[in-house]
Image: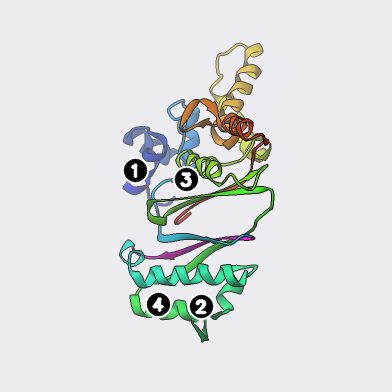
Amino acid sequence: MKDITADMIKELRERTGVGMGKCKEALVLAEADMEKAIDILRKAGMASAVKKEGRETKEGLILTAEDKDTLIILEANAETDFVTQNDRFKHFVHDCVKQALETKPKTLAELNEQPYFKDRSITIDQYRNLVIQALGENIQLKRFELVHKHPNRSYGIYSHMGGKLLVVVEIDGASDCEEIAREVAMHVAAESPDYLKPEQIPADVIAREEEIARSQMVGKPENMIEKIVAGKIKAFADQVCLIHQKYVKDSTVTVQQFLEACGKKIGKPLSVHCFWRWKVGQ
């Protein structure tokens, strides 16, 4: 078994809200497996709403660029915040996202192999190596997404924490509702949904939740267990699925109800088609 460190105990506390002593006990029982420790605390009824994010493990910057047909999302990582705040690092990331918008590569590998638009004698990857030499830290382009815009959809972008968290929301039903889409993107940034709707929750995730729920039913009448478990699964789905979450700016409605109300005002039915929530280091 690997050693249980103070940082692991702290992360478990941050994710569950349970006291340090109980967190250490759970990690010992789980043989230092963080997810198993979380399950132990949940089965014991000590943890309910668990944050999926612990400590940030990397530094970096996430940027977007868009034109009328395409939207680019790009993340670059470095070792320290000192470097990510450096103008040379920022220029590098801006140049990469600008080039990606112009050339529209299919993959990150393809982008890395392209000639750099400001100096075609070097590739983007060689440009990256020059920045590494100048700043003295490992720098990587970590992930890249090219979104082909649909003519009957709107795209809302919300950047938070100086580019360490970025959300893009794609709204179906109208092409001129960027502000509504951005409102939903702000909600996604704050509430961190895992899925768009319940149908997207994987079977193994539902099975895990059922197991945890049933472990809490000891002593309950048999005829009540199925009803209680079903209620707990629905509550879980409402917590992790965007459209059923309580809207962060008005908890009397869900995100879906917020969009339905917006749609009625403009005379067009609106719905979330998909979303991207990127946090540096994930």
The mark found on residue 125 in the picture is 2
Callout 2: few (<14), some (14-19), or many (20+) C-alpha neighbours within 10 Å? some
The residue at which mark 4 appears reads as 131
Q: CA–CA distance between discs 2 and 4?
A: 10 Å
Q: Quick one: SS at disc 4?
A: helix
Q: Nearer the viewer, mark 3 or mark 2?
A: 2
Q: CA–CA distance between discs 1 and 2?
A: 37 Å
Q: Nearer the viewer, mark 1 or mark 4?
A: 4
Residue type marked 4 = Val
Q: Say above or below: 207 vs 185.
A: above
Q: Nearer the viewer, mark 4 or mark 3?
A: 4
Residue furthest out toward the bottom: 121
Q: Earlier in the sequence, mark 3 or mark 2?
A: 3
Residue type marked 1 = Lys
Q: Quick one: SS at disc 2?
A: helix
Q: Is residue 103 magenta?
A: no
The mark found on residue 33 in the picture is 3
Residue type marked 2 = Asp
Quadrant of residue 146 within the rendered picture: bottom right
Residue range (magenta): 69-80
